Amino acid sequence: MIKTMNCTRCKTKAVLKLPRHNAAFCKDCFNSFIHDQVHKAIRSQEMFAKNDHLLVAVSGGKDSLALWNILLKLGYKTDALYVNLGIGDYSESSQEKVVHFSETVAVGYGAALHVHTVERHEGAGIRELAMMAHRPTCSTCGTIKRYQFNHAAIQHGYDVMATGHNLDDEAARLLGNVLHWQHEYLEKQGPSLPASVDGFAKKVKPLYRLTERELAAYCVLNKIDYVVEECPMAPGARTLLYKEVLNRLETESPGTKQMFYWGFLEKSRPAGTPTTIMEKDRSALHPCSLCSQPTTAEICSYCRLMARAKTSTAR
């Protein structure tokens, strides 16, 4: 016989058990738990203030739509940006989910949605651009999205750019950086990256205290429709392997991901403070000679990518 779980907070029937917290919650208490975790992330990392104007990068997936919903419910002025990568039905379905949320939920808070279409602005979809530039698809995608996220935030005057990276994402990224001893990446692994120079927006990750499973449950319980399928470009990505390894550890020892990533943040704090990062960025970054966005080279990675794609097309 299966024993009925009771909510840890209110003692009514629970709908979800969270082993890493040794707790179970009903829907209302679970929503409060999720909102509390995001509030703690914002406060502890000094991500932004109530009067800041935020831009959330949305993909149509559970994490980014949950983040937009949470920030609106917490009272933050939050608009969103969707980048259509031109990946056939997947991109069209993703955009439909984002537009649906914008028109049914976000509009009630006066929030706006910006849409950037790669095929229209960059001249081709992400697959084609990767082939033309002779670059891996995921690398090409990352370069374009980072550029457009920052560009939109600066162009439209937002104070902060927020992304839906969760605890699973950050723990997997940390594992990869540690395995390869990527010192520069480790230094900037934190959930809050300051706006160190003009043209570089502050970037934050308010969901770093929450797991994929918790965010999926939040969307289901709150009827947030999202794209369930993984990006068709994702298979073979090393990050998926790191997530699988961490999931096995989490199953055997609940709380492993939390201890790994939160422990890293605590231990690395003196070396990677916002002030230290800002000082290093100011000495290393300067405007790209073509687009003026900050870069460590004469020409930024986005402009180099687009130049290679154009050269390939001209042949």
Image: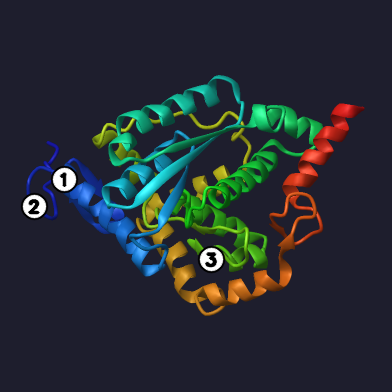
Q: Which quadrant is home to the C terminus?
A: top right
Is 271 located above or below residue 244 in the figure? below
295 shown above or below 228: below
> x%, y% of residue 52?
40, 58
Identify the residue at the far top of this view.
89
Q: Amino acid at mark 1?
A: Asp
Residue 157 vs residue 306, the one in the foreground: 157
Whether residue 166 is visible to the viewer of this picture, yes or no, is no
- For the point 42% across and 28% down, the residue is 99
Frontmost of labels 3 and 1 is 3
Q: Which residue is mark 2?
A: 10
Does label 3 or label 1 sit earlier along the sequence?
A: 1
Mark 2: few/some/many CA within 10 Å (<14, 14-19, 20+): few
- Residue picked out by circle 3: 194
- What residue is disc 1 on? 28
Amino acid type, label 2: Cys
